[in-house]
Image (tube, helix red, strand yellow):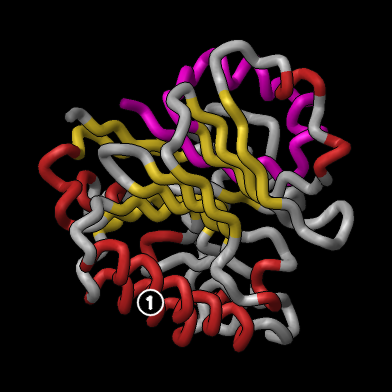
Amino acid sequence: MKLISWNVNGLRAALRNGFLDALQTMAPDILCLQEIKLQQEQIPEEIKTLADYKSYWHFAQKKGYSGVATLTRTEPAEVRMGLGIDKFDSEGRVLITEFEPFVLCNIYFPNGQRDHGRVEYKLEFYAELLEIVNALRDQGRRVIITGDFNTAHKEIDLKNPKSNQNTSGFLPEEREWIDRYLQNGWIDTFRHFHPDLPEQYTWWSYRFNARKRNIGWRIDYFMISENLLPYLKDAFILPEIRGSDHCPVGMELEF
């Protein structure tokens, strides 16, 4: 089973930039999208009419902002939107789909902003989500957390760590929350297979020709609960897939 996660930075823009060809190339069983930037009435016909996928959505109240979607070949047993906390749920950041082998949490984590104005909001979100996913795992469920975490964990995870020490996305207090997830038993699937592989990024600025020069950050993840580890076969990044300032990340499970 192949799962892909992709911050598309506007689904309609991604469609204009080859999204459907990318979907055909990747051929995921489940595709998690973040930052879709649309409302219910704006779901593109190209997505509505996809024969192979059912789609589920959590929209932000603010138009043209945030939002997540999950496209899946298999119909989930249950779909839940949000964390149950208004200040987060109004921004359309969480879509939880339950399948027989696992619970899938498609997450668009907040950005702390250049002026650090939303760092506290972001850290609160990390804390609330951790409680929820820990509770699911402690009930015996196998759990997947995927999406744009908006944080690079270690120096290996961005091109210029020294010059970004005071940049949101690499602040010590943000990186500490990635540590906490790992300390709570969550597994960063890409680093599980590639612990020391450098220059593996998932986001590049549109400025300074950053993508061509591979001046990037790894801020998109698949994390799994330890009880899913026996089924994990691969985890990967797809930098060759264009259409957004992020590239897709993925993993494969075998049950």
Q: Image check: 158 left or right of 231?
A: right
Task: Tell me where residue 130 sits by quadrant.
Answer: bottom left
Q: Is residue 201 left or right of residue 2?
A: right
How far across and down, in percent of the image, does residue 117 sit? 73, 86
Q: Which residues are magenta?
A: 1-30
Residue situated in front as seen by the camera: 78 or 150: 78
Q: Amino acid at mark 1?
A: Glu
Picture coordinates of residue 253, whole percent (x, y): 25, 33
Work out which quarter of the rendered image holds the N terminus and state it: top left
The spot of residue 15 in percent (x, y) is 76, 26
Measured from the top left, where is residue 189 in percent x and y? Answer: 28, 49
Residue 122 lies in what quarter of the image?
bottom right
Residue neighbourhood size for the residue with mark 1, other residues' Cα within 10 Å, grouped as few (<14), some (14–19), many (≥20) = few
The residue positioned 63% from the left and 60% from the top of the image is 93
Disc 1 target residue: 131
Up-down: is 56 above or below 103?
A: above
The answer to whether 62 is drawn above or below residue 194 in the figure is below
Would you identify the image quadrant in which residue 183 lies?
A: bottom left
View extreme (left): residue? 230
Horizontally, is 2 left or right of 40 in the view? Answer: left
In the image, what residue occupies the spot 67% across and 51% down?
A: 58
Name the residue rendered at 61%, 39% in the picture. Answer: 56
Dot 1: what SS? helix
Examine the rendering and report whether any part of residue 109 can be seen.
Answer: yes
Q: Quadrant of the C terminus?
A: top left
The one nearer the camera, 92 or 153, is: 92
Question: Residue lying farthest front?
Answer: 77
102 within the magenta span: no
Q: Is residue 246 visible?
A: no
Identify which residue, 224 or 234, lies in the foreground: 224
Q: How many marks?
A: 1
